[in-house]
Image (spheres, grey):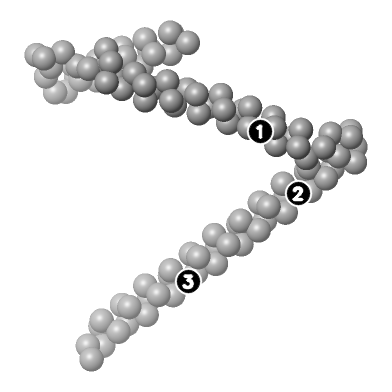
Amino acid sequence: MNAALLLGALVVSVLLIWGLLSIIKTTFKTALFVALVVFGLQIATGIGPMQVFQQVGNFAGGALSGISEWLRNWGGNYKPPSDFNKGKQALEWVLQQALASLSSD
């Protein structure tokens, strides 16, 4: 067996396992922090977990509605003109469309 291939596969495997463990560790830390914040709110103010997560859903709903609006307009009047050139004109067009989209809200 090729030693370089074996060494490379070993290094990649170790890096993948290390990355996976880092993700799992971060997930547990975040879950613990969220639980502590929700518990602290419940003890200090009487706000229950359902109220907290309902408000989080409202925040996410606002963000998701903006994304859905953008996707709805994807095939609409946001298409570039037929004589569209690359470069500076492309950047100007993108900025105009972004400003028009932001000002319409």
Tell me the residue at 22%/17% (across/down): 79
Q: Position of residue 82 (x, y in %)?
A: 11, 14
Q: Name the quarter where the N terminus is drawn.
A: bottom left
Q: Which residue is mark 1?
A: 56
Q: Is residue 23 above or below residue 59?
A: below
- Please state which of the two labelled residues, at mark 3 or mark 1, is closer to the viewer: 1
The disc label shown at residue 17, or none: 3
| Disc on the earlier residue, 3 or 2 | 3
Q: Which residue is mark 2?
A: 35
Which amino acid, by three-letter code, is at mark 2?
Ala
Residues at circles 3 and 2 in contact by the CB criterion of under 8 Å: no
Tell me the residue at 26%/88% (across/down): 3
The disc label shown at residue 78, or none: none
Which amino acid, by three-letter code, is at mark 3?
Ile
Which amino acid, by three-letter code, is at mark 1?
Val
Residue farthest to the left? 83
